[in-house]
C-alpha cells in the first residue's frame, strides 16, 4: 500500500511521534509512506517527499513537525476536493492520514464525505476534541504549565503577591483545570463557567486573612467574567488598537489589586506551552495513534479517526469528533474547586 | 466525621498528593483527619498525629510520604485486627484510608472483611493493580526512565555500543513497555513473555547490519530468558553469595557481546525511578483519588478502593483489585514490538 | 559565637541553600544561628527565630526563602541604625549575615560603616553585582529561559513566525546574553547597547530570505531602541494608565511585523525565571558562599562580602560590590553576535 | 581559510555546540569548515564531509556528536603523523580543531609538536583537565547526578535505608564533590582521598542515632578504601571473571550494612551522566570555546587550547593542559565535608 501523511494546525508536542510511528508500522507491513508538506497545502499543491525509516530517525522526541504545517482554510479546501482526488490518483495513494485539530478533522470529514480514503489522527494541546479521552500534546502542555506554577509559587510567596497565571484554552479549561489541580492553585477559572470577580477576590482574600502570604490564580485565556462584574473594561484593544496583548489575566490582576489592596501581577505563559519535547505519556499516545491509523488503512476503515478510550485505542467516526467541543463538565470543575 | 489515613509500602510519587487531598476535602466537609505513622504500624501501635491544612501545606509536589511508610506484614496484621478495631474505637474514627500497593490492599481487604470501615487508594509505580486503568506513580516512573533513555541514546551512539537498560518491573513489564515505546528502544523485554536471546541478538544485529551505530534494549528487571537459551548462568548469586546485584541486564549484556561482537553494557536505573517530584499527571490522579476516598467514606462505601476508568474516578471492590495482577496483554506487547 | 542571618529583596533560587550552609557550618564550629524574618524588617523589629539543623532540613533544593523577605528601604534603615545596634547587643550577636542584591548590600554597607559587624552574601538573578564573577540564581534563571527558548523554537517554526522573547534584565543583559547564546537565538538585545530596529529587521529578514521559516529574538526587558527609530511609541502606559504591562517585546513585535510582513509575537517569560528549585550550579555556589560567610565572621572580616573569582571563594569589600553595576562588556556582546 | 574539526573520546554534552560555533564563526569570517568522521580516524583515513550552516542547524542542544567519535589510540596516531600531514596538505587545510579529553589533547600535542597547525578544545565531563577552570559537559553531568540524588532522597527516607550512589570519576572526584554538595549528601568519597570505612560508618550511624531515617553517600567510581579496612574483598571480578560489574558502591553497601545493621543499597548512575541535552551553562561554554578556536586559528596561535579563566576565554599551551590531572584540592574537599 501507499499512504500519505500530513500535519496541520498549530504546534503540538507528539506530531513527529505520530509520523514516525506511521512510517515504522507501514514499513513493517511493506507499505510506502509519503509526507505532504505544510498540511493540506501539500496535498492540494502536490508538494511532498518520501518518508522512510531514515527520514524519521531521531524525531520521536522532537517537538514541532518535520513535515511543516499550516492553518487549514476550509473554503480553500472545499474548492480543492477534486484536485486532492486527482493527486491521490496520480500518486497512487491508498489513503491519507491527516493529523490535526478540530479544523483539520472537519476538513478531513469534508474530503471523506466526498469519497476520499482518509483516516484521521486527532491532535490538540487543548484536549477539547470529543470522542477521545485525551489527545497527545495535552499532557505536555499541562506539564509545562505545572512546572511554571511550581516555580511561581516561591516567587509569589517571596514577594507576598497574588499571581494571575494565564494558560492556554480559548474555548475549554482543560489545561487550567489540570495544571491548577497539579500545582495546587488557589483558584482556577475556565471558559465553561463565567466567574464572579467578587467571589475570586473573596477566596483569595480569605487566604491572606488566614495568614498565608501569597495566592496563585490559574485562568484559561478564554475565561470570562460574569457580565457587569468587572470594574476595568474588557481590555481587548491596546493603545495601538491591537487586540492581542490584552487578556483576562491582566484585567483580573487590576481588579484583585483594587479589591484586596495586595500586589497582583499577571503572568501569561503563552506559546511555551505548545512547543518542545513531548512527555513520555504523549509519545506513547502519539505512537499508538500512528500505528492504529495504519492498521485502519489496512482494514479500509475510512472516515474515522483514532481515539483513546480507557487504555484502548479505538476508531471513531470523524462525525463524532467534530460534532461538539469537549468541555470541562461541571463535576470535574467542582472536584477541582473542592480540593484546592 | 473523623478519618484516619496511612501510607504503606515502597516509595511512590504522589503519596503526599493523596494525603493533602484527603485533608483538603475532609476539611471542606467539616471532617477531622489524623495520619498514622509508618503505615499499618501506626494503626497497630496507635502512633499518629492530627493533619490539618497547615500540616499538608507545600507537600503536593514532594516525593515520599510525610507520614512515613513500612512494608506490610500480613501475619502481623492478622493478629492485630482486634487491636486495630480497638484503636479505631478509641480514636473515634469513622474510617481509615490506607494508601498502598497490592500487599496493602490485601491487608485492607483482610481488615475490611473483619468489619473495619476501610476505603483503599491504590498505589504502585508498576501499574500492576487490576481494576484501575492506571495508578499514580507510574507516569513519573515512566518519565524518569524515558529521560534516562533519551540521554543514553546519544551515549550509546557515541560509543557505538549496545546498552541494556534495566527498568523496574519484577512481575509486570508496564514501565519497560511505556518507556521503551516513548524512547524508541530497539527491543523491549517484559516478564510476561520469556525472551529468546537469539531473537534479541538477531534484531539488534540487524540494526548494525543496516548501518546503525548503536542499539538500546529495555528490559524489565523481572524479564526471564526462555529456559536453556542463555550461555551465562543465572547470575543470582554474586561473589559474596548475595542475590541483589545480579540481574537480567547484566546477563544479557554478556550474551549480546558474545553473539554480536559489539560492546554491550548494562545500565540499571534502580531506585531513581520511584522517588522525587511526581509529574502533573500523577498529581492530578492522586488528588482525584484522595478526594474520592473521602466522598466514599461519606457514602459509607467501605471495602472498596478508588480507581480510574477512562476519565472517571470510580469505586471498585478491594476483592477485584487483589484478585489478579494486571499484566501486559499480548496485544499491547505486539503493538510496541511493531513500531520500535 | 552567635550569628544572625537574613534574606532581603526579590526571589532568587539558592537563598535557602545559603541559609542552610550558614547553619551547618556554624553548627560544626559550635556557633548558634538565628534567622531574622522578612529581611531588614526582622532586624529592625527584632523579629526572629532560632535556626538549627532541623530548621533547615530539606530546604537545600527549595526555591524562595524560609525566612521571608522584603524590599529594602534604605531611608527607613538609616533611621534604624541605632535600633539595629541595640538589637544586636540585646541578642548577643557577634555578626549579621545579610543575603541580598544591590540594595541590600548598600544597606549592609551603611550599617557596616556605622560599625555593625556585617558579612554580606550577594544575590541576584541578574548577575549584575560587580566584584564577583557570578551570583547564585543567575544560572537557574538562564536555565529556565533557555528551556523556554528551546520549546519556543519548534512553535515558531511550526507557525512560521518571529517570536520576540522578553527575559529579565532591567539594567543589564546577562540573562539575555547567556540564554540567547545557549538557545541559539537569532538576535539578542541588551540594555547596554541601544538597538537599531532597522538592523534587527534586516537580520531577521535575511534569515527568511535564506529560506528559514522562523526567527527567535531575545530581548532583555530593559533594552531600548535608539531614539527615534521606532514607529510605535514607547508603550509605557497601558489603557488604564498603568505602566507594567507594556514592554519592549511588544513594541518590537509590532515593528517587526510591519517591516517584515511576517507574523511576530511577543512572549514575556516573567516571574517564572526567578522562582523554584535552583540548579546544581547555584546550589554549590550558594553553599560555598554561606560557608565562607561563617568563616569570615570567625576571622572578624566585616564590611566585606563573599565573591567567586575563578574557582575560588574570596572576600571583597562591600564598597567594591556596590560601586558600579556589572554590565555586559562590548567584547562579550560581540562574541555572542558573531555566533548566533 | 579552511578549517577541519573533529571530536574524539567519550560522549560529552556540548560537543555539537562547539562544532556549530566553529562553523558559525568561521562562516562569518568567510572560512570553510570540514568535519572529520569518528575523531582521529577521520583525519588519518581522510574521511570527512563539508560543514556549512545547514549542516549544523538544530544541533546546539543535541547530545552526542554529529561527527561521530572514537577512542584515541596514540600509538596508531604516532605512526600516522605523516599521513595526517599529507591529508592536511591535500585538503588545503590551514588548521585542525580537535575537540576531546586528555587523550585527545595528548594526541594533539604530539601532532602539534610535529608541526601540524592544531588548536585544541578541551572536553570532559570529569572536569579533570588542568589549565582551564572548567570544561563543558561537567555541569550537565553534575546536574544529572543531582537530579538523581534529589529523587533518591525521598526513596531512601521512605525505605529507611542508606543509599550508596556511585557517580562518574575514575581518577578525580569533581562530579561527586559538586553533586554531593548540591544535593546535600551525608558523605562524599573521592579518589583523591582514600576513605576509612569505619569513619564513613560512624558518620552515617551518627545520623541514625540523631533520629534521621536515611542517609545518602555519594562515591566517585574511582574512590578507594584505605588498604586493609574493608571486610569484603575488592570485588573486581564477578562470577564470570569480568571486571566491570563490581565497584566501590557495592562493596561499601555490604560494609555499611554489616556495620550499621541498616539496609544499604548501591545505585550506580552510569552512562546517563554523559549523554543528552547539555545545560545552558555547558552550551554557552562550548559555544565560546568553538568561537575562540576559530579566532586562534586566524591569529596563527597553534599548539594551544581554549580555556576558561574566571569569566574569560583564553588560550593556554597544550603542554599545560596535559601535564597533570586537575584533582580535587584538599581545601575543596574539606569545604564540602564541613557543610554536608
Image (cartoon, coloured by chain):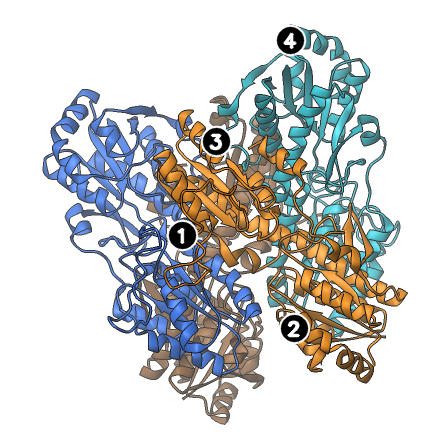
Chain colours: A cyan, B orange, C brown, D blue
Q: Indicate which disc, 3 or 2, sits on the residue closer to the N terminus.
A: 2
C-alpha distance separating marks 1 and 3: 25 Å
CB of mark 1 within 8 Å of CB of mark 3? no
Q: Residue furthest left?
A: D114
Residue name at image x 82 percent, y 47 percent: A224
Q: Is residue C82 above or below residue B213?
A: below
**Marks 4/2 same chain:** no
Same chain for mark 1 and mark 4? The answer is no
Quarter of image, res D160: bottom right
Q: SS class of the residue under badge 3?
A: helix
- Please tell me if label 4 and label 3 are on a single chain: no
Mark 4 to mark 3 CA distance (whole Å): 32 Å
Residue denoted by label 4: A92
Q: Quadrant of the C terminus of chain C?
A: top left
Which dot, 1 or 4, sits closer to the camera?
1
How much space separates mark 3 and mark 2, taking CA atoms? 47 Å
Residue at screen point 24% across, 48% down: D314
Question: On the rendered image, what quadrant is the N terminus of chain C found in?
Answer: bottom left
Residue pointed to by mark 2: B67
Which quarter of the picture shows residue D217? bottom left
Circle 4: element type: loop
- What is the number of the mark on residue D270? 1
Q: Which mark is residue B203?
A: 3
Amino acid at each position: 500500500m501507499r499512504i500519505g501523511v500530513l500535519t496541520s494546525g498549530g504546534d503540538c508536542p507528539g506530531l513527529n511521534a505520530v509520523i514516525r510511528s506511521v512510517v515504522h508500522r507501514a514499513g513493517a507491513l511493506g507499505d510506502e509512506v509519503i509526507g505532504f508538506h505544510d498540511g493540506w497545502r501539500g496535498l492540494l499543491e502536490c508538494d511532498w517527499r518520501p518518508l522512510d525509516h531514515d527520514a524519521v530517525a531521531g524525531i520521536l522526541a522532537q517537538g514541532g513537525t518535520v513535515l511543516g504545517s499550516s492553518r487549514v482554510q476550509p473554503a480553500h479546501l472545499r474548492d480543492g476536493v477534486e484536485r486532492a482526488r486527482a493527486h491521490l490518483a496520480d500518486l497512487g495513494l491508498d489513503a491519507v492520514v491527516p493529523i490535526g485539530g478540530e479544523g483539520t478533522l472537519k476538513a478531513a470529514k469534508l474530503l471523506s464525505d466526498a469519497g476520499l480514503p482518509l483516516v484521521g489522527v486527532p491532535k490538540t494541546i487543548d484536549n477539547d476534541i470529543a470522542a477521545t479521552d485525551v489527545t497527545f500534546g495535552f499532557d505536555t502542555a499541562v506539564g509545562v504549565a505545572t512546572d511554571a506554577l511550581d516555580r511561581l509559587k516561591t516567587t509569589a510567596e517571596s514577594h507576598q503577591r497574588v499571581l494571575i497565571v494565564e494558560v492556554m484554552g480559548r474555548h475549554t479549561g482543560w489545561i487550567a483545570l489540570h495544571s491548577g489541580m497539579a500545582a495546587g492553585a488557589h483558584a482556577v477559572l475556565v471558559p465553561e463557567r463565567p466567574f464572579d470577580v467578587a467571589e475570586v477576590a473573596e477566596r483569595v482574600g480569605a487566604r491572606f486573612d488566614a495568614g498565608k502570604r501569597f495566592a496563585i490564580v490559574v485562568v484559561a485565556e478564554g475565561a470570562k467574567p460574569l457580565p457587569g462584574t468587572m470594574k476595568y473594561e474588557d481590555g481587548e484593544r491596546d493603545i495601538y488598537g491591537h487586540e492581542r496583548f490584552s487578556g483576562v489575566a491582566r484585567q483580573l490582576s487590576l481588579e484583585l489589586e483594587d479589591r484586596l489592596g495586595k500586589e497582583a501581577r499577571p503572568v501569561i505563559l503563552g506559546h511555551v506551552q505548545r512547543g518542545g519535547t513531548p512527555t513520555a505519556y504523549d509519545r506513547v499516545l502519539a505512537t499508538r495513534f500512528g500505528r492504529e491509523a495504519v492498521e485502519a488503512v489496512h482494514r479500509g476503515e475510512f472516515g474515522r479517526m483514532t481515539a483513546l478510550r480507557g487504555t484502548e485505542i479505538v476508531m471513531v467516526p470523524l462525525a463524532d469528533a467534530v460534532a461538539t467541543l469537549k468541555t470541562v463538565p461541571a463535576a470535574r470543575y467542582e472536584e477541582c474547586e473542592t480540593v484546592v
